[in-house]
């Protein structure tokens, strides 16, 4: 029985052996590929690879649907299914099992991971069809893809922080493998390593948060990092304070929950690419496009947002940490949106868009609107997967060209891709009636009403400005890709055509979801206007799972805020249409006039160069000159290993070496002398 966080009683957990199959199916598929690659060592038919790879996430999706409907049929205070696979870590009174938990929060994201993930697997069949390398690239790709899905599912379904961390590290490993999948290109390998290293920085903070919680819970006599147990004892944790260094802001006495919340959020900053650890995500575009879609839409980058929502009971007791989350999200949303304005690589535009949209999600979570954050996670998965896979369709048609400077006029040659991509553009911009409109409306509303967050009205203004910029750069990339005259070489233009059905069919499904997906989280106002019962809303479904108090706002205020968001979108669209459709030569003139300002934005404010100069190069020099030359080569090898060997060689070694002559008669003589000496000693000793 688990406290629901609202004083309304307890949540009764029911056992279910079905939950384990959701992550195990893609894990077994990845293991099967690994065995075939390692031991069979001969070409495996692509039909078998596809059958294993696509069936696993699809069946996992079906199992998730079964459990979801089982969950919906349960009373609101009993919507919790658990599956204890086996005991895992035990030390003294501490025990952490490999246990899985399926509640409304996990159910929503699991449906996204398995559903959208399956569509990406299907899309990958066509996208990777021309990969015929001798290293088994096609099968290796699907092995990594299945492993990525399994790791994300363990993260989402984990019943405790250790199982979540297992999946947390798993998605980090898989991102390294998939971003650097084409490792023959040095740049791809570098990007994969960059993602791995930057995420390790964030993971250090996440581990610190876990250790702090373990220490505090053990001190309370409940050595556990299980989510239900942590939630049950959150009141006792909230009473604790810790002394922090005087140079930190505020008082030297902090709430324990604030310290833990900030430590966990450092992990979320790395995994979900927020300032200052966002730089790995744009470079993740080095991997194949299906990987980009999986990372940005259904896995990895949503992990940080999900973790904050899962720990909502802790952040509700940590207002300082929550305010930090809100402001980090708001600033990241605006900052990343400005960088997307001047990019010409179609995937880079979408990458900075993801960083910006993740900022929206953290803005909502920091304002205490965890339902709005998960609502935007869900709708974003639909339209961002659509946009990335749509860009992949363009890239395939353009023979792997990603620069929009060399595109244009593709709407006639790629009518289906053009149509579905435009749906994604409208959805992410918040066009009325589409999924992004409803979820973004909830995010902005949460900022407007978050009086507990300092400067919440400023955060609302930042969110509104970001909405206008988002509409601008998304219509810009669409216009430069599909409208106007083609700027591609003639030999490329002659062979542009829609990719295979395995590529385009998932786009149609995602386009439908991008249009209709907003129905899952309608507020009371929109439910009444559209005629959808409010009882089906996400807020009611999450009741008792996230620690959140429904906001009270009049319909007139909500309509006014929605109107402001639509006006911001319209301004962005109008400006982009004027520059890139009505007056296509004007942007070049503006770029020339802005000069260094344009170059500053185009080169992403030189943040990567700054990190390289201030952090990377000094660390490399320190590692080479101090750690390698002085410590490793000088102290350990020179003084330790080689030095001790030289001492022995210079002293006893020079004498004892004569005992190793290699002559049998010499050894026999030594044995006789030694035997006589031992016998003589025994005789005289008596």
Image (spheres, grey):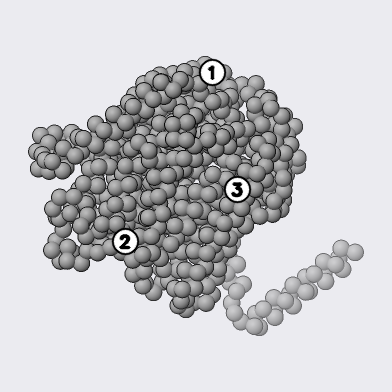
CA gap between label 1 and label 2 equals 50 Å
* Disc number lying in front (3 or 1): 3
Q: Front-most of 343 and 121?
A: 121
Residue 487's place in the image compared with 518, above or below, is below
**Residue 679: image x %, image y %?**
83, 71
Q: Earlier in the sequence, mark 1 or mark 2?
A: 2
Q: Front-most of 451 and 171?
A: 451
Residue at x 38% of width, y 40% of height? 434
Q: Which residue is mark 2?
A: 185
Q: Which residue is mark 3?
A: 68
Q: Which residue is mark 1?
A: 252
Residue 202's place in the image compared with 553, above or below, is below
- Under circle 3, the secondary element is helix
Do the residues under discs 3 and 2 have CB atoms within 8 angstroms? Answer: no
Q: Is residue 569 left or right of residue 107?
A: left
Q: Is residue 119 left or right of residue 222?
A: left
* Disc number lying in front (1 or 2): 2
Residue at x 60% of width, y 58% of height? 24
Q: Earlier in the sequence, mark 3 or mark 2?
A: 3
**Residue 224: image x %, image y %?**
69, 38
Q: Is residue 516 visible?
A: yes
Q: Is residue 614 left or right of residue 67?
A: left
- Under circle 2, the secondary element is loop
């Amino acid at each position: 029985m688990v406290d629901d966080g609202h004083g309304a009683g307890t949540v009764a957990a029911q056992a279910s052996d079905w939950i384990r199959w959701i992550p195990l199916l893609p894990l077994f598929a990845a293991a099967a590929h690994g065995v075939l690659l390692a031991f069979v060592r001969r070409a495996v038919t692509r039909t078998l690879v596809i059958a294993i790879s696509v069936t696993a996430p699809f069946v996992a999706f079906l199992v998730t649907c079964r459990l979801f409907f089982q969950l919906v049929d349960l009373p609101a205070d009993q919507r919790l299914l658990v599956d204890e696979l086996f005991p895992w870590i035990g030390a003294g009174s501490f025990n952490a099992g490999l246990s899985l938990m399926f509640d409304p929060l996990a159910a929503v994201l699991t449906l996204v991971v398995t559903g959208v993930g399956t569509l990406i697997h299907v899309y990958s069949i066509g996208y990777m069809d021309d990969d015929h390398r001798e290293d088994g690239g096609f099968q290796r790709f699907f092995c990594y893809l299945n492993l990525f899905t399994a790791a994300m599912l363990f993260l989402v379904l984990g019943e405790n922080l250790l199982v979540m961390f297992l999946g947390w590290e798993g998605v980090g490993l898989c991102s390294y493998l998939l971003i650097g999948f084409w490792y023959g290109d040095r740049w791809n390998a570098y990007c994969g390593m960059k993602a791995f290293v930057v995420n390790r920085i964030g993971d250090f903070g996440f581990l610190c948060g876990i250790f702090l919680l373990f220490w505090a819970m053990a001190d309370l006599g409940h050595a556990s990092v299980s989510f239900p147990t942590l939630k049950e004892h959150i009141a006792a944790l909230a009473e604790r304070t810790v002394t922090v260094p005087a140079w930190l802001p505020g008082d030297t006495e902090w709430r324990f929950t604030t310290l833990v919340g900030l430590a966990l959020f450092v992990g979320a900053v790395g995994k979900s690419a927020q300032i200052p650890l966002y730089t790995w995500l744009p470079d993740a575009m080095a991997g194949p496009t299906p990987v980009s879609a999986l990372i940005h839409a259904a896995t990895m980058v949503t992990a940080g947002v999900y973790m904050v929502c899962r720990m909502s009971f802790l952040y509700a007791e940590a207002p300082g940490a929550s305010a930090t989350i809100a402001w980090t999200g708001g600033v990241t949303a605006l900052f990343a949106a400005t960088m997307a304005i001047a990019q010409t690589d179609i995937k880079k535009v979408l990458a900075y868009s993801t960083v910006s949209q993740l900022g929206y999600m953290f803005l909502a979570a920091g304002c205490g609107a965890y339902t709005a954050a998960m609502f935007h996670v869900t709708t974003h998965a639909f339209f961002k997967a659509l946009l990335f896979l749509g860009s992949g369709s363009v890239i395939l048609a353009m023979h792997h060209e990603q620069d929009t400077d060399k595109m244009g006029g593709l709407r006639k040659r790629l009518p289906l891709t053009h149509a579905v991509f435009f749906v994604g553009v409208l959805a992410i911009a918040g066009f009325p009636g589409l999924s992004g409109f409803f979820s973004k409306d909830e995010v902005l509303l949460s900022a407007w009403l978050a009086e507990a967050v300092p400067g919440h009205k400023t955060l609302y203004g930042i969110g509104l400005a970001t909405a206008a910029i988002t509409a601008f750069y998304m219509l810009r990339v669409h216009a430069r890709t599909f409208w106007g005259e083609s700027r591609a070489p003639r030999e490329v233009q002659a062979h542009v055509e829609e990719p295979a059905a395995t590529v385009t069919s998932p786009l149609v499904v995602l386009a439908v979801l991008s249009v209709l997906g907003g129905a899952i989280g309608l507020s009371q106002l929109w439910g009444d206007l559209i005629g959808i019962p409010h009882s089906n809303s996400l807020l009611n479904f999450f009741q008792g799972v996230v620690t959140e108090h429904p906001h009270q706002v009049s319909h007139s205020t909500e309509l006014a805020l929605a109107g402001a968001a639509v006006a911001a979108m319209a301004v962005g669209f109008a400006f982009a249409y004027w520059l890139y459709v009505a007056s296509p030569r004007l942007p070049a003139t503006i770029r020339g006039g802005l000069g260094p300002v344009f170059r500053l934005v185009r080169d992403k404010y030189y943040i990567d160069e700054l990190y390289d100069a201030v952090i990377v190069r000094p660390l490399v020099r320190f590692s080479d000159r101090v750690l390698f030359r002085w410590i490793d080569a000088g102290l350990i090898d020179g003084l330790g290993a080689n030095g001790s060997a030289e001492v022995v060689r210079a002293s006893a070694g020079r004498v004892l070496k004569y005992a190793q002559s290699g002559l049998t008669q010499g050894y026999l003589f030594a044995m006789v002398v030694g035997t006589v000496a031992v016998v003589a000693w025994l005789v005289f000793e008596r």
